[in-house]
Amino acid sequence: MPTTTTDPNQKQAELSPDELQRYSRHLTLPEFGREGQEALKNASVLLVGAGGLGSPAATYLAAAGVGRIGLVDFDSVEASNLQRQILYGTSDVGRPKLDAASERLEDLNPHVDVETHEVRLTSDNALDIIDQYDVVADGTDNFPTRYLVNDACVMTGTPNVYASIFRFEGQVSVFATEDGPCYRCLYEEPPPPGLVPSCAEGGVLGILPGFIGTLQATEVIKVLTGVGEPLVGRLLMSDALNMDFRTVNVPTNPECPVCGDDPTVTELIDYEAFCGLPQSDESSPNGTADSDVSDTDDAVPETSVHDLKQRRDAGDAPFVLDVREPYEAEIASLDADQLIPVDDLEARLDELDAGPEEEIVVHCRSGARSAKATAFLREQGYDASNLEGGVLAWSEEIDDSVPQY
C-alpha cells in the first residue's frame, strides 16, 4: 500500500491532460498505471542533501511526478561538485545549491512543487521539517546527520530511504517503516571518529552517486506507490569496480534503543556528541556536503589563517607542514614547507625537515587531518599547532584565488 500522510478526507488531486501525456509511459505499466501515478502526484518527499545522491534522486523523482519535493541544504555550488552533482552546471558555481536545484527541477517538471529548507538539519528542527513529508531520502555523508534523520523518522513514523557512497561502493535500504528495522538496527553505534574518511578525503567515483541515487529514487517510488517489494529489512550493497551487487538481510532489533520494544531514546539528542565529535557550526552544511570535520580534542593548539598570514608578511613565518595527499596539493597550495600525508607521518617522521624545537603549523583541507597530525606531533615532543579551517578558511578569509575543493 502507498505510504502517505495525506488527510483521507481531503480530495485527491487527479492527473491533468498534460500530465496524462507526460506520464504516458508510466500509465502503460500494468503494475503502475493511473493509480500509481496519482499516488505520486499526491505524495511528498524530503531529500536531505542536494549533493551527489540528492542530485539524481531529486531529478528522477521530479521527472516521475512526485507532487511535492522538499530539499534541505545550505551549501553553495563549488567547481569540485560538478564531477558528480548533476543538478548543477558551471554557471551555477558560487550560487546557493537550493536556488540552482529548484530552478532545474521546476524547469524539468512544472507540475512539481519544490520546497526549499535552507537550514542545517538539527535536533531543534528535524522533527518539524520531516513531519511535513511522506518519505525521507537521506543523502547525507556524515554519521551525526544519518543518526539524526533515522531517529526523527522513527519518531514521526516517516519511512527513511537511505543511501550512502564511498569511493567505488554504495549502499541502499529502506528504514523506519511500520514493520521494518531502522538504521540503528543495522549500525547501533557510529564508528570511532576519523575511522571512515569523508568523500572529500577518500574520494568518490563521479558516476557512483548517479546510479546509487537512482536506486534510492526507485525505492522512494516503490514506497509511495506500493509497487514491488521495497528494500525493507534488506541492505543492497554495490561495488562498482567489480560491478557486483549483493543483498543482506537486516532484521529488526527488539532491543534497538530507538525502534525496539522498550526504546531508551525517545527524543532527539546531541548527535555530534553521540558520534564523538565536538559541536561545530561549521560542520557539514546539511549533513550532506563532503565534510572533513575535526574529531580531535579541543585542547590541540590552533593557529588562525589570519595569524599565519600576518607572520608570513612580517617575515616571521613558522614551518608549515601539509598533511594532505599529493594530488590535493596540486589542486590548491598554501606554499607549505613540506608535504607528508597524515597516514604516512608516523612512518616518515624522520623525514620531517623541522626539529622539535622549531614551531610547526600543520594544515589540511579543513582542519580534521591536520588536527590529528598535530596531536601526534605534540606527543612526539614537537611544538605543533593546527591551522584552523585549513585550505578552506585560507581561501574564504585570506586569498580567494586558492581553489576550494
Image: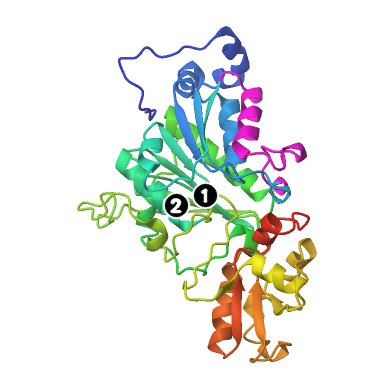
Give the x, y percent position of residue 210: 64, 44
Residue 187 against residue 114 in the figure, above or below: below
Question: In terms of depth relative to the viewer, which is nearer, 164 or 271?
Answer: 271
Q: Is residue 25 magenta?
A: no
Q: Position of residue 392 (x, y in %)?
A: 66, 59
Residue 342 placed where, x, y %? 63, 76
Which residue appears at 61% of the width and 58% of the height? 199
- The region drawn magenta spans 82-111
Q: CA distance from mark 2 to mark 1?
A: 7 Å
For disc 2, the neighbor class at 10 Å (few under 14, some 14 to 19, many from 20) is many
Judged from the image, the secondary structure of the residue bearing numbered disc 1 is: loop
Mark found first going from the N terminus, 2 or 1? 1
Q: Amino acid at mark 1?
A: Thr
Which residue sits furthest front? 314
Q: Using residue 332 as the reference point, say whether residue 298 is left or right of it.
A: left
Q: Quadrant of the N terminus?
A: top left
Residue sitting farthest toward the left = 262
Q: Is residue 100 magenta?
A: yes
- Which label is found at residue 140? 1
Q: Which of 305 and 230 lies nearest the eye of the viewer?
A: 305
* Apparent side of residue 105 relative to residue 2 in the rendered image (left or right): right
Q: Is residue 224 above or below residue 394?
A: above
- In the image, is 251 to the left or to the right of 32? left
Q: In terms of image quadrants, where is residue 49? A: top right
Q: Residue at x 69, y 50 (%)?
A: 206
Q: Residue at x 74, y 87 (%)?
A: 353
Location of residue 214 (image quadrant): top right
Q: Which residue is mark 2?
A: 146
